[in-house]
């Protein structure tokens, strides 16, 4: 079997179209997305991820976030149902809040956990309590939520992890230089070790599935290396999961949309200096170009 990575380009994406949405599809048909994100220090991460999820077509949005910022979140994202969760003294999500999340979690099609969360130990305990509820949902882990893999065995059901090279080095004990030298090998090893789809982000983003399939995307620009950019990417991937894409397809499309959105902003504004909050709108335009109605 040919195990060379598939290049993610316009041709690849057109041959791998996202699930079609009927003209009369309501918000339920377009899928429910649950974003578990944000903290007192980094509330905007939830906003960026949630906005991206809606821009790529998810239909119904719920945001679960610490109670200290829940009211502000509701006004900032009026499209969302906001679920206030109890916090630890360090500002993380208290695992005791899982019960309040059960209904929204089991109703979701795509679930994103991690952007902007604080308190590593609480986050990991929260996640391991949450995962048994997510037997049919597609799960994307980003930022601090990825720390749950440290010292853990493989996932019972595959999830998607989205580390950049530094995070991958932290999670595996490899050096950042080794990860950057061969991101595809790093992603492939991690995918098999954790039974996960793994995307190692960078100038060349490598995606690997547990069964050995892999994809490679080259592109984007230096402007994407900006605060909040990864939150936008994670939200877009989870939003595509909510509307019916598989983990691998959602990741490939999300990476391409993110990179091409950065290219559009670089042309409009300059190679650096555009903001992560500007990416979701451009992603919508790219999506329209790549998958016309």
Image (cartoon, rainbow, N blue to C red):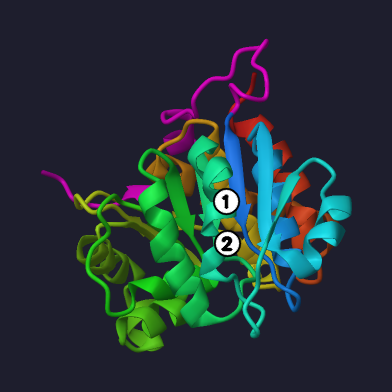
Is 235 located above or below residue 162 in the figure? above
Asked if the magenta segment contains residue 21, the reply would be yes
Q: How many neighbours does mark 1 have within 10 angstroms: few (below 14), some (14-19), or many (20 or more)? A: some
Point out residue 244 in the picture as x, y percentages from the top left corner: 48, 31
| Residue extending furthest toward the left | 1
Q: Which residue is drawn at 42% across and 76% down?
A: 147
- In this view of the protein, can residue 273 be seen by the observer? yes
Tell which of 133 and 36 is nearer to you. Answer: 133
Tell which of 181 and 134 is nearer to you. Answer: 134
Image-based side of 197 in relation to 43, left or right: left
Q: Main secondary structure of the magenta part?
A: loop
Tell which of 174 and 124 is nearer to you. Answer: 124
Q: Which mark is residue 153?
A: none
Image-based side of 3 in relation to 124, left or right: left
The quadrant of the rendering that contains the C terminus is top right
Point out residue 213 in the picture as x, y percentages from the top left corner: 24, 49
Res 186 quadrant in image: bottom left
Q: How many neighbours does mark 2 have within 10 angstroms: few (below 14), some (14-19), or many (20 or more)? A: some
Residues marked 2 and 1 touching at CB (< 8 Å): yes
Asked if the magenta segment contains residue 5, the reply would be yes
Point out residue 268 in the picture as x, y percentages from the top left corner: 84, 55
Q: Name the residue under label 1.
A: 101
Q: Residue at x 42, y 31 (%)?
A: 16
- In this view of the protein, can residue 237 be seen by the observer? no
Q: Name the residue under label 2.
A: 97
Give the magenta-colored segment's residue range: 1-30
Q: Assign a secondary structure to mark 2.
A: helix
The CA distance from mark 2 to mark 1 is 7 Å
Res 272 quadrant in image: bottom right
Point out residue 94 in the picture as x, y percentages from the top left corner: 57, 71
């Amino acid at each position: 079997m040919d195990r060379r990575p598939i290049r993610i380009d316009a041709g690849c994406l057109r041959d791998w179209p996202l699930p079609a949405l009927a003209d009369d599809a309501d918000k339920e048909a377009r899928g429910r997305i649950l974003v578990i994100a944000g903290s007192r220090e980094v509330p905007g991460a939830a906003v960026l991820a949630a906005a991206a999820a809606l821009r790529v077509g998810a239909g119904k949005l719920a945001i679960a976030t610490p109670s200290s910022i829940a009211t502000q979140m509701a006004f900032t994202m009026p499209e969302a149902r906001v679920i206030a969760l109890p916090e630890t003294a360090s500002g993380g999500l208290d695992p005791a809040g899982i019960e309040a999340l059960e209904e929204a979690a089991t109703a979701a099609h795509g679930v994103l956990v991690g952007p902007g969360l604080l308190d590593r130990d609480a986050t990991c305990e929260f996640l391991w309590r949450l995962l048994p509820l997510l037997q049919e949902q597609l799960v994307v882990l980003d930022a601090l939520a990825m720390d749950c893999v440290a010292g853990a065995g493989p996932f019972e059901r595959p999830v998607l992890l989205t580390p950049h090279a530094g995070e991958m080095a932290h999670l595996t004990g490899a050096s950042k230089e080794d990860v950057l030298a061969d991101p595809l090998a790093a992603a492939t090893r991690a995918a098999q070790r954790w039974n996960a789809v793994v995307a190692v982000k960078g100038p060349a983003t490598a995606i690997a599935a547990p069964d050995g399939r892999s994809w490679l995307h080259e592109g984007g620009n230096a402007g994407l290396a900006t605060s909040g950019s990864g939150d936008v990417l994670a939200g877009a991937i989870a939003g595509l999961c909510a509307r019916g894409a598989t983990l691998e397809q959602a990741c490939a499309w999300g990476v391409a949309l993110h990179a091409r959105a950065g290219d559009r902003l670089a042309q409009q504004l300059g190679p650096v200096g555009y903001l992560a909050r500007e990416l979701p709108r451009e992603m919508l335009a790219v999506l329209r170009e790549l998958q016309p109605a």
